[in-house]
């Protein structure tokens, strides 16, 4: 995990720099380095879990690095990933590259919120995630803070409402989020031009 985090940091630093307080960098299949491929598209343990969730035809789509430095004291807003790509359901694997706690920006999720598409507001305020719902819309719902250690993985549906805590402990918090789908189903999403088949054959 430490080696992978360093490689992702070096790639972002070489492309656009790490001077932003927080950011997201997406890599598609044709842009993967060897170490990233090993973690998200050629990892037996990941594929085994994904087959239990998706079924026998698992397809890798992309991976993104998400970072918050120690001065990022705002939380990521509540949102559903589906609004960024539409189409058939996708599964995300949120991989902790650092320990993630309530103090440094761990993920927050609302169980069973994946059963419907929620209406999102479009907001541009420099904090990312332009499709979001206000904090008031989740008031009273069960919210789970996903406190994990580096190397742990959280799998969730692309309609699952999630956000993240602000980073208040003064240390960087990095994660990688890989996206997968069921290759046996036709998908109207046009976000991905290439994919990597992890098991069986796609349509």
Image (cartoon, rainbow, N blue to C red):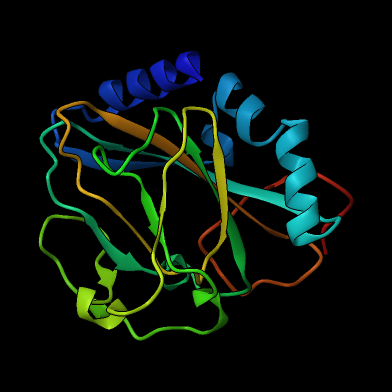
Residue 174, picture quadrant: top left
The residue at the point 27 percent across, 79 percent down is 139
Q: Is residue 90 above or below residue 63?
A: below
Q: Nearer the viewer, residue 48 or 15?
A: 48
Residue 177 location (% of width, % of height): 48, 44
Residue 46 location (% of width, % of height): 70, 39
Left or right relative to 9: residue 86: right
Q: Is residue 29 above or below residue 15?
A: below
Left or right relative to 182: residue 175: left
Can see residue 2?
yes
Q: Is residue 8 above or below residue 76?
A: above
Can see residue 197?
no
Q: Nearer the viewer, residue 112 or 78?
A: 112
Residue 15 location (% of width, % of height): 29, 27
Q: Is residue 170 above or below residue 145?
A: above
Q: Nearer the viewer, residue 15 or 169?
A: 169
Report the residue that reaches farthest toward the right: 200
Residue 125, picture quadrant: bottom left
Figure label count: 0
The residue at the point 75 percent across, 60 percent down is 54
Q: Quadrant of the C terminus?
A: bottom right
Residue 183, picture quadrant: bottom right
Q: Nearer the viewer, residue 184 or 127?
A: 127
Left or right relative to 27: residue 107: left
Residue 126 location (% of width, % of height): 12, 55
The residue at the point 14 percent across, 35 percent down is 20
The residue at the point 56 percent across, 27 percent down is 36
């Amino acid at each position: 995990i430490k080696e992978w985090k360093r490689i992702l940091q070096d790639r972002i630093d070489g492309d656009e720099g790490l001077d932003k307080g927080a950011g997201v960098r997406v890599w598609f299949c044709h842009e993967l380095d060897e170490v990233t491929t090993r973690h998200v598209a050629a990892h037996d343990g990941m594929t085994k879990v994904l087959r239990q969730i998706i079924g026998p035809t698992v397809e890798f789509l992309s991976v993104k690095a998400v970072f918050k430095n120690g001065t990022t004291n705002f939380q990521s807003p509540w949102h559903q990933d589906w609004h960024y790509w539409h189409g058939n359901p996708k599964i995300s694997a949120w991989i902790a590259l650092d320990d993630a706690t309530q103090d440094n920006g761990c993920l927050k999720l609302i169980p069973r919120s994946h059963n419907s598409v929620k209406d999102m507001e479009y907001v541009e305020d420099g904090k990312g995630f332009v499709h979001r719902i206000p904090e008031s819309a989740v008031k009273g719902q069960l919210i789970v803070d996903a406190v994990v250690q580096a190397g742990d993985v959280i799998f969730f549906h692309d309609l699952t409402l999630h956000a993240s805590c602000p980073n208040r402990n003064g240390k960087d918090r990095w994660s990688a989020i890989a996206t997968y789908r069921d290759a046996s189903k036709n998908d109207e999403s046009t976000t991905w031009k290439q994919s990597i088949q992890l098991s069986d054959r796609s349509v």
